[in-house]
Image (spheres, rainbow, N blue to C red):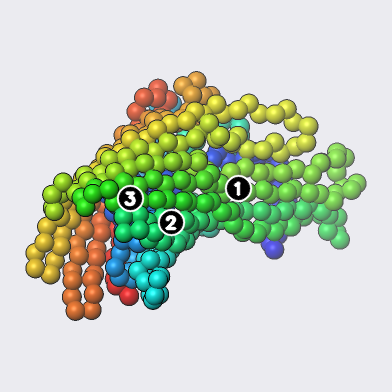
């Protein structure tokens, strides 16, 4: 519980909530392999990244593996002809894939996966521009929320695996109380609490042929909300009455989505992955709740559903105890925003991805190093332009 200046609290009364941004896995893909392959993995992920891409993929690893990584993004965006300052992304990734060592009928049939994303400086950050202030609704401060995924997979048949998991986000609630102290001065007392919100992820994968796998995954709506109650006990300290207000909104929003994907091993050294993701952006919420009671309702943002196509390739080569992978991909992210949006701006995005990995097999197991890079180019909007790049990597070791 902390004290803050009265002026800061009074200013807070006028601030509506932040626009709703999307998450780090939604923007970049979960982990280095998915990030290098245009966010794919529904049909062929095989490590901790499966907790998000498709939990059924957790049955693929034969060994327990722990991975640690880092991701960074730098933005070069423009809005209405001027440079748009977007906070840089800096975050750590921690993941684990754990085949469960049961015997009997459960032998080689269950696996557990965990993945965590930690922004380096915050648990949950929400900004509060005015409702009519133009901003890049799906890019501003979009990766500033802690997220965690946990999933369990089961092998139903040699060709069929299923999995289910949950995505956990940090949410923020609190209260700011304004009251006079014993000396008659107006003071504020602020209290904040971090709670959690849960989102289901359910997937299935089928090995149709030895060289062909198909997968499907359902991800529910993912929202990290915040709600700050502003109450007062000023009595006769002010000549006007200030009602109890709420500064509330959504700090992070990913829509309900269904992804379908196929992964074909064309040659032992060449794999091709093709997929599409349907996103129900038509449920995109208002950027904020009205702070004061009796305020006229806000108009709907008017966002529409989209389909995101993806394609990726992976080349592999063996050298004695070393195995090298080269990866590349492309996706096109149609903007869900209406063309005449006055404030919640967005643009189509062309996304090119590239990466590579080195696996070194030794007597203690396998050491794997993965690196990836992405370039996101905005297009199709007269008001938003520019681009941004994402770099990241992970190191994985057998447990």
Q: Is residue 69 left or right of residue 321?
A: right
- Can you see residue 226? yes
Q: Are marks 1 and 3 in contact (CB under 8 Å)?
A: no
Residue 206: numbered disc: 3
Residue 103's image quarter?
bottom left
| Quadrant location, the N terminus | bottom right
- Can you see residue 98? no
- Give the residue pinned by disc 2: 163
Residue 26's image quarter?
top left
Residue 377's image quarter?
top left
Residue 391: numbered disc: none
Q: Residue at x 46, y 51 (%)?
A: 202
Q: Secondary structure at mark 2?
A: strand
Q: Nearer the viewer, mark 3 or mark 2?
A: 3
Instruction: Judge by depth and name the residue closer to the eye, 325 or 214.
Output: 214
Q: Residue at x 74, y 31 (%)?
A: 295
Q: CA distance from mark 1 to mark 3?
A: 36 Å
Q: CA distance from mark 3 to mark 2?
A: 12 Å
Q: Is residue 318 above or below residue 270?
A: below
User: Dot 2, crowdedness within 10 Å: few (<14), some or many (≥20)?
Assistant: many
- Give the residue pinned by disc 1: 225
Q: Is residue 61 above or below residue 175?
A: below
The x, y position of residue 345, in whole percent, is 48, 30
Q: Residue at x 35, y 54 (%)?
A: 160
Instruction: Judge by depth and name the residue closer to the eye, 104 or 295.
Output: 104
Q: Secondary structure at mark 3?
A: strand
Tell me which label, 3 or 2, sits earlier in the chain.
2
Instruction: Judge by depth and name the residue closer to the eye, 79 or 213.
Output: 213
Q: Is residue 243 left or right of residue 369?
A: right
| Quadrant location, the C terminus | bottom left
User: Dot 1, crowdedness within 10 Å: few (<14), some or many (≥20)?
Assistant: many
Tell me which label, 1 or 2, sits earlier in the chain.
2
């Amino acid at each position: 519980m902390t004290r803050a200046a009265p002026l800061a609290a009074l200013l807070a009364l006028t601030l509506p909530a932040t626009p709703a941004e999307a998450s780090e896995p939604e923007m970049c893909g979960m982990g280095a392999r998915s990030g290098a392959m245009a966010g794919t993995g529904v049909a062929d992920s095989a490590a901790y990244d499966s907790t998000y891409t498709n939990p059924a993929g957790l049955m693929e690893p034969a060994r327990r593996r722990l991975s640690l990584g880092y991701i960074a993004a730098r933005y070069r965006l423009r809005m209405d002809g001027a440079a748009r300052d977007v906070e840089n992304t800096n975050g750590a990734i921690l993941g684990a894939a754990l085949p469960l060592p049961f015997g009997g009928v459960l032998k080689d049939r269950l696996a557990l996966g965990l993945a965590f994303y930690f922004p380096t400086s915050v648990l949950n950050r929400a900004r509060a521009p005015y409702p009519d202030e133009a901003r890049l609704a799906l890019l501003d401060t979009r990766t500033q929320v802690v997220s965690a995924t946990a999933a369990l997979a089961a092998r139903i048949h040699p060709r069929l695996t299923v999995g289910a998991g949950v995505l956990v986000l940090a949410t923020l609630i609190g209260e700011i109380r304004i009251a006079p102290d014993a000396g008659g001065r107006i003071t504020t007392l602020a209290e904040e609490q971090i709670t959690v919100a849960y989102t289901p992820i359910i997937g299935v994968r089928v090995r149709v042929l030895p060289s062909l796998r198909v997968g499907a995954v359902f991800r529910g709506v993912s929202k990290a909300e915040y709600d700050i109650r502003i109450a007062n006990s000023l009595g006769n300290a002010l000549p006007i009455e200030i009602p109890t207000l709420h500064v509330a909104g959504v700090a992070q929003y990913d829509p309900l989505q269904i992804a379908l994907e196929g992964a074909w091993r064309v040659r032992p050294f060449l794999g091709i992955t093709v997929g599409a993701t349907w996103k129900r952006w038509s449920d995109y919420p208002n950027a904020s709740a009205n702070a004061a009671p009796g305020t006229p309702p806000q108009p709907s943002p008017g966002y529409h559903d989209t389909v995101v196509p993806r394609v990726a390739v992976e080349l592999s080569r063996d050298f004695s105890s070393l195995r090298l992978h080269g990866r590349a991909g492309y996706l096109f992210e149609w903007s869900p925003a209406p063309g005449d949006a006055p404030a919640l701006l967005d643009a189509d995005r062309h996304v090119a991805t590239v990466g590579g990995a080195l696996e070194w097999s030794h007597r203690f197991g396998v050491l794997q190093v993965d690196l990836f890079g992405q370039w996101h180019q905005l297009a199709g909007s007269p008001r938003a332009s520019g681009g941004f790049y994402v770099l990241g990597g992970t190191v994985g070791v057998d447990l």
